[in-house]
């Protein structure tokens, strides 16, 4: 008998995206990846690949209908931020499980998202949406420095900067507002958010079908950037704080209409309690779903495929351990000559995975976002702290050999 089909509309090209086809097969589904440019993918996890104009909902629906000849399409989803609306719209057109495409469009716009959260009584930073440098400076002055200036769309810390003064705010705003296209070549909105900087540790709540499955502690690089350099799961929180973070995250996804599937909810623990920074209507990046599985046995990727294909797959914890990841970060621009110490990192007790993302000869340009990651070390332990110690020791054993780019003077 031909298996039902599970369709992925594009995918994140690194990290857990390639695990979605594995989860689909575990649920008895045949995974198909619709991709505009299949060459972008070093691995598709064994999925069947169909070249499709994934910027067009009509083209995605047509591709799904062709796939349904002689078999049934059970679900349409994506692991990529950029295609959540397209996947949902296609699923709705086909009568399949999905969140509202209109709600997802509102969530993807950070200004609209913030306004909806604030209207629902969810605590968010003070913020202003601005379309000119003068508006940015007026908003920053009203809010009080330092402020965070970031684009209204995007992910992975792209374009997010802590601005300590008017000069930094104006320069960064000017750069963002002058962009015509994003990293995929799509037109970008000429708007940014200017928001209050909330001091305090950062966490993310991993939500599935409206319920928090766990809370991750985040490690960030040095200001003024917000590059995530590692994660620990589960976060070491006092019961009352854990409850407050859980309540805030679940209130946020209710307010935004994310009743089905995953959400990655980022918060900061400010002086007055949790403050919602951002809600993403997808699973977390940075290998966080793998951390959850290593620590608890719960498979959020499997749960996500089940949610969007109408299949029962309860996400239940079967263990109570800890897991952590630390990323190998590029310190500066240059040509990568080599990566040493991978075997030594693998030998650290508790380390279960070491991976490098770049090959020798690659040109490295540090941009202050997730693309600065060169690799990772993932560890498991009896507690998150034990796992974190293993991941940190493993990263410490890895060294990058770089040829630093020389500045040429006139």
Image (cartoon, helix red, strand yellow):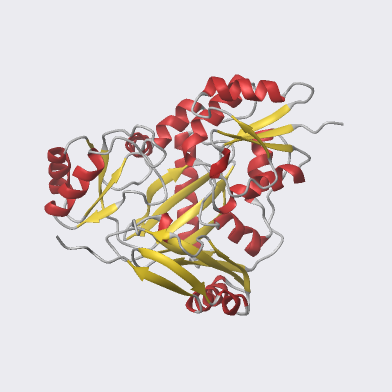
At x 76%, y 46%, the residue is 26
Total marks shown come to 0
Question: In which quadrant will I find the C terminus?
Answer: bottom left
Quarter of the view holding residue 220 = bottom left
Rendered view: 259 above or below 140? above
Position in image of residue 2 (x %, y %): 83, 31
- Eyeballing the image, is 273 above or below 119? below
Q: Is residue 231 visible?
A: no
Left or right, 366 with respect to 232, comes to left
Please, which residue is most extreme toward the front here?
410
Q: Is residue 132 above or below residue 321?
A: above
Occupied quadrant, residue 179: top left
Q: Residue at x 45, y 36 (%)?
A: 255
Q: Residue 401: horizontal and vertical position, in percent?
A: 43, 73
Q: Does residue 265 appear in this view? A: yes
Left or right of 196? Residue 153 is: right
- Quick check: 291 above or below 157? below
């Amino acid at each position: 008998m031909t298996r039902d089909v599970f369709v992925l509309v594009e995918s994140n090209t690194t990290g857990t995206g390639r695990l979605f086809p594995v989860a689909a097969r575990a649920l008895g589904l045949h995974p198909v990846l619709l991709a505009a440019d299949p060459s972008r993918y070093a691995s598709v996890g064994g999925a069947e690949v169909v070249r499709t104009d994934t910027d067009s909902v009509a083209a995605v629906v047509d591709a799904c209908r062709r796939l349904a000849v002689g078999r049934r399409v059970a679900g349409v989803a994506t692991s990529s931020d950029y295609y959540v609306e397209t996947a949902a719209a296609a699923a709705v057109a086909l009568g399949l499980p999905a969140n509202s495409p209109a709600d997802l469009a509102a969530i993807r716009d950070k200004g609209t998202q913030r306004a909806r959260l604030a209207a629902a009584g969810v605590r968010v930073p003070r913020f202003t949406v601005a379309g000119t440098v003068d508006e940015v400076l007026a908003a920053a002055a009203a809010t009080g420095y330092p402020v965070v200036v970031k684009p209204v769309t995007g992910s992975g810390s792209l374009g997010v900067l802590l601005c300590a003064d008017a000069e930094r705010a104006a320069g960064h705003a000017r750069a963002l507002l002058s962009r015509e296209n994003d990293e995929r070549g799509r037109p970008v909105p000429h708007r940014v958010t200017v928001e209050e900087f909330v001091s305090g540790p950062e966490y993310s709540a991993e939500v599935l079908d409206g319920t928090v499955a766990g809370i991750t502690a985040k490690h960030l690089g040095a200001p003024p950037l917000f590059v995530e350099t590692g994660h620990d799961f589960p976060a070491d929180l006092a019961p009352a704080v854990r409850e407050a973070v859980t309540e805030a995250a679940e209130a946020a996804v209710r307010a935004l209409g994310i009743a089905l599937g995953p959400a990655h909810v980022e918060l900061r623990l400010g002086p007055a309690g949790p403050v919602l920074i951002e809600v993403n209507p997808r699973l977390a990046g940075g290998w966080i779903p793998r951390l959850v599985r290593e620590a608890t046995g719960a498979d959020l990727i499997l749960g996500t495929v089940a949610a969007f294909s109408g299949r029962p797959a309860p996400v239940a914890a079967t263990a109570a351990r800890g897991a952590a990841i630390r990323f190998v970060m590029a310190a500066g621009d240059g040509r990568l000559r080599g990566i040493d110490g991978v075997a030594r990192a693998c030998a650290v007790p508790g380390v279960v995975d070491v991976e490098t993302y770049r090959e020798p000869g690659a040109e490295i340009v540090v941009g202050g976002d997730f693309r600065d990651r060169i690799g990772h070390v993932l560890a498991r332990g009896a507690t998150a702290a034990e796992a974190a110690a293993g991941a940190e020791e493993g990263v410490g054993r890895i060294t990058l050999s770089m040829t630093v780019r020389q500045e040429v003077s006139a």
